[in-house]
Image (tube, rainbow, N blue to C red):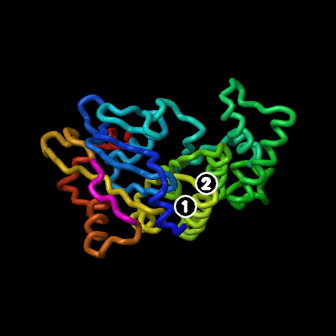
Amino acid sequence: MSQLEAKQAAKTMIQAKKLGKRYGQDVILERIDIDVKEGEFVTLVGASGCGKSTFLKMLLGIETATDGELLLDGKPVPNEPGSDRGIVFQQYSVFPHMTVLENVVAAKGFEKRSISGYLFGKEKALAKQEASDILQQVGLSHALNRYPHELSGGMKQRLAIAQAIICKPRILLLDEPFGALDPGIRADMHTLVLDLWQKHKLTIFMVTHDLKEGFHLGTRLWVFDKLRHDPHAPNAYGASITYDLPVGHAPAPLYEEIDQRIRPVFDPSKDTTDDTTENAL
């Protein structure tokens, strides 16, 4: 079966139907209608504060819809995180007092939902072996006994990915995971994520501010933008998905238009950004 045939045969995993999200009177997202098949890799781009990360949080289950529906396998996304949905943030979510190996074993332990998350006996031995295997896959087999402060930024992000992967999620959520990394390290991370996507048969959603990165990775690119604007009430309308494009197929004029929308040239006379609201999103 070809990749195209496999994609067509895959079942729908995620559906959004008239999905919207508001915080009080501020509308963040509105009228989002999408279907995502199992095994797709979707990158999300858009201006800061347009709701990309909010959408990821809704998939994770730590934010709920205020309008419409967000479905996983035809049922509402659970309103709490689960082991079927792993997430990696730009800020490294690792335990500073644990070694690399202990960090990944701990992630496996927390999957049990016990009070302590501790593993014992045979269960702990199996978790350590599984963690070692995952760390080898992400290129950290030489650093099992190091502590996070002894790791470079790229190594910390590899560790965070290993923590997410060990729980065998079906969906991996990446919230600007490479934004703080140097270009050369980012290229290595791209190769790693693409390899893990194929190896673990993941469905991936990745937020990025880098349009080139968005078009380089995965299978689809979504552009989040507002279709309606009110200069007197900037938060009266929310963002929708204005473009849903196959990766690598945007003609130059469209690429430039999208790039301008998500990274507009700064004009001080028109700066109406509310830093407090934007950072909260």
Picture layout, residue 278 above or below residue 2 = above
**Amino acid on which disc 2 is placed:** Gln
- Estimate how packed mark 2 is, as few (under 14), some (14 to 19) or many (20 or more) residues with alpha carbons within 10 Å: many
Q: In percent of the image, x 77 and y 56: which residue is there?
A: 143
Query: Does 82 sit left or right of 265 as displayed?
Result: right
Between 74 and 54, the residue placed more toward the observer is: 74
Q: In percent of the image, x 34 and y 39: which residue is there?
A: 276
Q: In which quadrant of the rendered image does the N terminus lie?
A: bottom right
**Amino acid on which disc 1 is placed:** Leu
Q: Position of residue 272 (x, y in %)?
A: 22, 47
Residue 157 is labelled as 2
Residue 254 picture quarter: bottom left
Between 156 and 173, the residue placed more toward the observer is: 173
Q: In percent of the image, x 60 and y 44: which residue is there?
A: 93
Query: Does 155 sit left or right of 81 as displayed?
Result: right
Question: Magenta stretch containing residue 191, yes or no?
Answer: no
Q: Position of residue 196 (x, y in %)?
A: 62, 59
Disc 2 and disc 1 in contact, CB within 8 angstroms: yes
Question: Magenta stretch containing residue 245, yes or no?
Answer: yes
Q: Which residue is mark 1?
A: 181
Instruction: Kindly report the distance in space between the C-alpha atoms of the residues bearing marks 2 and 1.
Output: 9 Å
For the record, the magenta segment spans: 240-246
Mark 2 vs mark 1: which is more N-terminal?
Answer: 2
